[in-house]
Image (cartoon, rainbow, N blue to C red):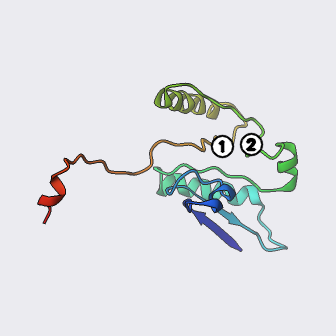
């Protein structure tokens, strides 16, 4: 079974998702009983394909097992780092730099930054009279 949750629905249901914005998603896959290939092998295959075919995407993989949840105290990963400060963009750059360094450590499978700042958007400026000229 495959279950996907894409984006965030504004309102009360938003508290039940790990998605941080409309451009984030999570996909949960349940393997059939008796499967011959392990979860970690499937994750490695999907990760490799995503890096080859969609390098602009970032992904985080978790086995979703009860053992992982207990060992991680309910967190997404066994090590939880948090960066804060008054300058949001500087804090985010520090977070990206930390993630790059942590990925170099032997044994680290994934780094996950839940609050990204690159939500696709377009900006434009208008005067109070401009909409009247749009026709």
Circle 2 residue: 77
Q: Residue at x 13, y 66 (%)?
A: 135
Instruction: Give the mark, 2 or 1, whose residue is nearer the N terminus.
Output: 2
Where residue 101 appears, as percent x and y from the top left, is: 60, 28
The residue tagged with tag 2: helix, strand or loop?
Answer: loop
The residue tagged with tag 1: helix, strand or loop?
Answer: loop
Residue 75 vertical placement versus 45 (above, below): above
Q: Give the side of residue 61 with respect to residue 120, left or right.
A: right
Residue 98 vertical placement versus 72 (above, below): above
Where residue 49 appears, as percent x and y from the top left, is: 55, 58
At label 2, counting other C-alpha atoms closer than 10 Å, the crowd grade (few under 14, some 14-19, many 20 or more) is some
Q: Nearer the viewer, mark 2 or mark 1?
A: 2
In this rendered view, identify the residue nearer to me: 60 or 87.
87
In this rendered view, identify the residue nearer to me: 64 or 85.
85
Q: Give the side of residue 130 with respect to residue 27, left or right.
A: left
Q: Quadrant of residue 118?
A: top left
Q: Residue at x 65, y 53 (%)?
A: 18
Q: Are marks 2 and 1 in contact (CB under 8 Å)?
A: yes
Circle 1 residue: 110
**Residue 119 marker:** none
């Amino acid at each position: 079974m495959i279950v996907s949750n894409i984006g965030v629905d504004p309102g009360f249901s938003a508290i039940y998702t790990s998605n941080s914005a409309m451009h984030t998603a999570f996909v949960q896959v349940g393997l059939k009983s008796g499967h011959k290939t392990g979860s970690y092998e499937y994750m490695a295959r999907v990760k490799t394909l995503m890096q080859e075919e969609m390098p602009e995407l970032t992904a985080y993989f978790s086995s979703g097992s009860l053992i992982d949840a207990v060992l991680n105290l309910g967190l997404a990963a066994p090590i939880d780092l948090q960066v804060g400060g008054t300058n949001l963009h500087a804090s985010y750059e520090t977070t990206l730099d930390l993630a790059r360094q942590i990925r170099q450590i032997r044994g680290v499978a994934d780094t996950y930054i839940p609050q990204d700042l690159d939500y696709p958007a377009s900006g434009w400026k208008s005067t109070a009279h401009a909409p009247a000229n749009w026709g």
